[in-house]
Image: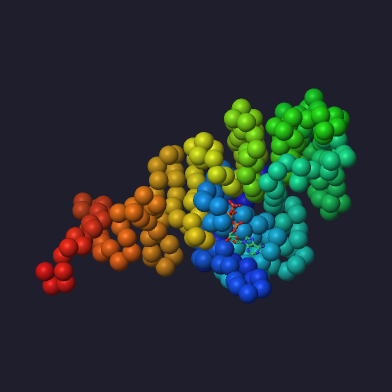
Amino acid sequence: MNGSAIRTRRLVHIYRSEGHDVAALSGVDLDVRSGEFMGLLGPSGAGKSTLLNLLAGLFRPSAGKIFIDDVELSQAPEAELDRLLRTRVSLLLQGAPRNLMPFLDPTENIAFAQSAARSDGVDLPPPADVLDQVGLAGAATRPLSVLSPADRQRLAIAVAISTGPGLILADEPTSMLDHRARDAILETLADINRSTGATIVLVTHDPDVADFLPRTVTIRDGRIGGEGRSGEEYAVVTADGSLVLPEHARLDLPPGTLVRFHLVDGQYVLLVEDPSRGVGD
Ligand SMILES: Nc1ncnc2c1ncn2[C@@H]1O[C@H](COP(=O)(O)OP(=O)(O)OP(=O)(O)O)[C@@H](O)[C@H]1O
């Protein structure tokens, strides 16, 4: 199965609460290719969870567009949207227990997660195969209370993949785990990405998780603040032609700094104007 592609254009989200509005996203243009495994980084309150929830269709953006494959979420008829989000998109909430039924064993949790898609006539693998895929074959009928935190997270992942999604959205799937468990969960997700081709977008605060991922996008103040590719940091030109400075350059280049773009041997070089030079010097 192919992974889903994501495209957002000028995505804006404003939370309206009594007395004041909060602009959580202020114009996000994000492209994720089918089958990518990528991370969303950024400081607390930057808008990562809001973006993830919008991609999962949990609520509608205040403005802008979200495409999952060729479907624009705000234009899709309700029934098509429901079906797309139920069959193609899985959201893994932060904290394994929020994704699980505590009184059901692992096999029953998978069967429960699959029940709606099965009644739509979708052909799905048996729960035992899904548990095997995440390394939980030996825990099929164990009560959740005896599973380790890492195994509970594996089960939450199993639930997320049990409907054969093309897109897995995971909110901090490795938080609250020790380093060994974290690395094992990342390997499990990487294996799912390779074997099923599903696109995976995960939110993380952990620099070690970011280093593991082939691509990261940093959200800052509700905008795309930069991109990382295999450890290399890049600034990103936005749709309106502006360039968000990397955090470290902001200290040296305060607002109002003049810069020139020079083309030298086919490469752009950014030259910072000497602030002591007056107009007409
Ligand atoms: N339901 C809500 N009502 C009002 N404001 C909200 C709501 N949810 C989030 N916000 C605000 O929107 C902004 C973005 O929040 P969001 O949770 O998306 O950030 P985040 O990057 O995921 O942060 P964290 O890493 O702490 O989870 C913040 O200023 C937050 O306070």
Q: Nearer the viewer, residue 213 or 47?
A: 47
Please give the name of the residue rendered at 84% of the width and 41% of the height, measured from the top-left corner. Answer: 102
Please give the name of the residue rendered at 73% of the width and 69% of the height, measured from the top-left corner. Answer: 77
- Rendering colour mode: rainbow
Is any part of residue 13 visible from this angle?
yes
Q: Outermost residue, front direction?
A: 19
Q: Nearer the viewer, residue 3 or 134?
A: 134
Q: Outermost residue, top direction?
A: 138
Residue 177, image x, y percentages: 65, 34
Judged from the image, the quadrant occupied by ligand 1 is bottom right
Please give the name of the residue rendered at 42% of the width and 68% of the height, measured from the top-left corner. Answer: 240
Residue 239, image x, y percentages: 44, 65
Is any part of residue 55 visible from this angle?
no
Residue 93, image x, y percentages: 70, 48
Residue 205, image x, y percentages: 55, 44
The C terminus is located in which quarter? bottom left
The N terminus is located in which quarter? top right
**Residue 105 lies in quadrant:** top right
Left or right of residue 34, residue 17 in this image: right
